[in-house]
Amino acid sequence: MTTSSVTPSPLFKLLALLLVALNLRPVLSSLGTVLPQLGLSATAAGWLSTLPVACLGLFAPLAPLLARRLGLGWAIRLALLAVLMGALLRGLGSAPALFAGMVLAGGGIGVAGVLLPGIVKRDYPGRAGLMTGCYTMALCLGAALAAGTTVPLAHRFGSAPLALAFWALPALVALLLWRYGDQRLASSSDRPKPLWHAPLAWQVTLFMGLQSSLAYTVFAWLPSMLASRGLSPEAAGWLTSVSILVQAPAALLAPSISHLGRDQRLPVLVAMLMTLAGLMLVLLAGPQWLWPAGVVLGIGQGASFGLALALIVLRSADAQVAARLSGMAQGLGYALAALGPLAVGAWQEAFGSWTAVAPLLAAIALFATGFGLMAGRNRHIAAA
């Protein structure tokens, strides 16, 4: 095991971890708010929203390899550099640049996202729920900030692509301040077998993937859903931002209080029912319910995402299992999640109405609830 020559203080390490988490959603949540201004067809917009989520899954298997070869510190640096370069590419404005930028940024986010749960399990074994909640809260704050400010930035810069490129700045700050140690994961000769044999690993993976498909559908399409209900683009952007912003305290509290019971089934059930209720209110209720619906949706999605990440840690016997489960849950899970925005966009285009999307979203939410309840049982995946 090697370490970097710089040994940061525990507080600095925590702040660095949170700053990385802050950069794992702005590139994604900023896109939906200005998507109508990019001049893309509905099909192209659907693919542009789907590709980066697919890349979260496709690039996730690279994370353990990079951590073994380069060390955790350099693996995170490389991931942040990909996010930075991807955000900058979007500023060129052409369709190829938009797609290339989203793919590159999605790959970086996929690598960094897989590595964080393993770091938490290793460095904070007695406070895994709290620490998972903290970095999930930072992740939600980054998403909310981008969702709420990208439209005003587009007005200020006079360009939607430049507003999208702005989100390279926080990635640059994180890259410059990252001083985490370069500990390596197990060498390739010590590489453990995948977790394909473990039903519990599949339950965690499917819960992660299905609830994430709803989250990325919200990032991509909630502003359009709200605009169809009569809100202006700025109001839709701000309501999306508020919905994502309230995810932050829910993402912090849900993993923390999940330890109070014997397992996590009740928190999972409550979180998913709130997510379902929020989506149905947005699509089916009267306009006066839009703001309450956004808040309920945000609380439910923040809690469910925090619980999904916490289950990766809580269902793992040790840090190595957590790293393997994180790779499986986020690799396969995000590949599944990528189908959400694409399916919703195609469904809406086929039926010509956002109201018609309600049954599809309800079905996804109910399947996510079922797998979440199975994953929430007090069981563990043993080291092997």
Image (cartoon, rainbow, N blue to C red):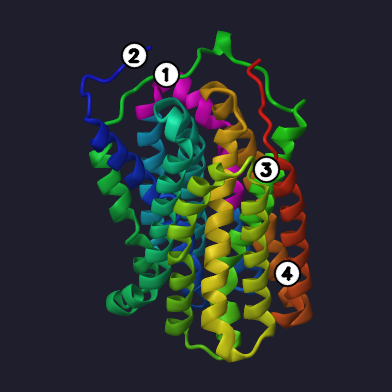
Residue at x 54%, y 28% (from the top left corner): 323
**Residue 94 showing in the rendered view:** no
N-term mark: 1 or 4: 1
N-term mark: 4 or 3: 4
Residue at x 38%, y 12% (from the top left corner): 1
Label 4 element class: helix
Q: Which mark is residue 184?
A: 1
Distance, label 3 to label 1, CA atoms, is: 30 Å
Amino acid at circle 2: Thr
Distance, label 2 to label 1, CA atoms, is: 7 Å
Q: Residues within 10 Å of mark 2 (few under 14, many from 20)?
A: few
* Range covered by the magenta-colored residues: 53-73
**Which residue is identified by label 2?**
2
Q: Please name whichever residue, 240 or 87, is drawn nearer the observer in this view of the structure.
A: 240
Label 2 element class: loop
Quadrant for the C terminus in the image: top right
Distance, label 1 to label 4, CA atoms, is: 43 Å
Examine the rendered structure and indicate whether residue 324 appears above or below residue 270.
above
Amino acid at circle 1: Arg
**Which residue is identified by label 3?**
376
**Which residue is identified by label 4?**
346
Tell me how many marks there are. 4
Q: Nearer the viewer, mark 4 or mark 2?
A: 2
Q: Nearer the viewer, mark 1 or mark 4?
A: 1
Label 1 element class: loop
Q: Which mark is residue 354?
A: none
Please state if 351 lies on the left or on the right of 271 as rendered: right
Label 3–label 2 contact, CB within 8 A: no
Examine the rendered structure and indicate whether residue 337 appears above or below residue 343.
above
Q: Position of residue 331 (x, y in %)?
A: 62, 39
Q: Position of residue 371 (x, y in %)?
A: 74, 47
